[in-house]
Amino acid sequence: MTTYTWTAPTRRGFLFASAGLAGLGAVFATDGARACDKHPGPGAPSEGRIAGPDEPGEPMEIEGTVYRPDGVTPAAGVVLYAYHTGVDGLYAATPGPPRLRAWFRTDPRGRYAYRTIRPAAYPERRFAAHVHTQLWSDTVPAQWGTDLLFADDPLLSAGQRRESEALARFANIRPLVRGPGGVWRGVHDLRLKTTGDHFEDNTRHGLQG
Ligand SMILES: [Fe+2]
């Protein structure tokens, strides 16, 4: 099976430390009237935070590029909605949208980046820890992106490893490298599909707010 290529996580670098984004908890900088709508507006940042700076857990920075279905052309202006569990392995203490979630919009080069904490596996520890992704734009039908999984996770199943390897350079099981300050860094590139997905009611929170 083809193995995926590791792209150095420092290829672009993060602005969080130097650009004063440490306090960026909001996911939309502008266009608040459309916040939490299916199309969050041009103000959605291409990079920012999911978990705030005080969130318990090990810090993690993920960056990536969203590509068109051809797998080659970067897709600009695509909304990326990402959400994950906290260190307790839960999305939220009560039914509803995940507590740790954010929307981003890919930059002209199709790129995005976020800082958050490493999610934990669900409490029953039957499934590997993961970050869910959804993607859409005015021209891209709403769809699931691949779940981000972590190569060092002992809970990964053989099936998950096979599925990831089949995605070649879009493999969703990604290595993380721990850098200065104990920050885990990794890359998660995504490839758009030509068709959208059906979203169950309990997973429409990216589209509906
Ligand atoms: Fe999940």
Image (cartoon, rainbow, N blue to C red):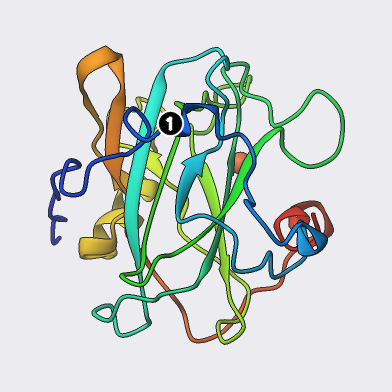
Residue drawn at point x = 33 percent, y = 48 percent: 63
Residue at image coords 80%, 23% = 93
Relative vertical location of residue 71 with respect to residue 79 in this rendering, above or below = below
Q: Is mark 1 within 8 Å of ligand 1?
A: no
Residue drawn at (56%, 36%) of the image: 50
**Quarter occupied by the N terminus:** bottom left
Q: Quadrant of residue 114?
A: top left
- Which is more toward the observer, 5 or 83? 83
Q: Nearer the viewer, residue 192 or 21?
A: 21
Q: Judge by depth and name the residue closer to the eye, 196 or 158.
A: 196
Residue 171 sits above or below residue 196 on the image: above
Residue where numbered disc 1 is placed: 20
- In the rendered image of this protein, does residue 190 appear above or below residue 186? below
Looking at the rendered structure, the secondary structure element under dot 1 is: loop
Q: Position of residue 120 (x, y in %)?
A: 52, 23
Instruction: Dividing the image into four quarters, tell me where ligand 1 lies.
Output: top right
| Quadrant (top left/top right/bottom left/bottom right) for the C terminus | bottom right
Q: Is residue 112 left or right of residue 174?
A: right
- At x 50%, y 71%, the residue is 78
- Whole-percent x and y of residue 148? 42, 46
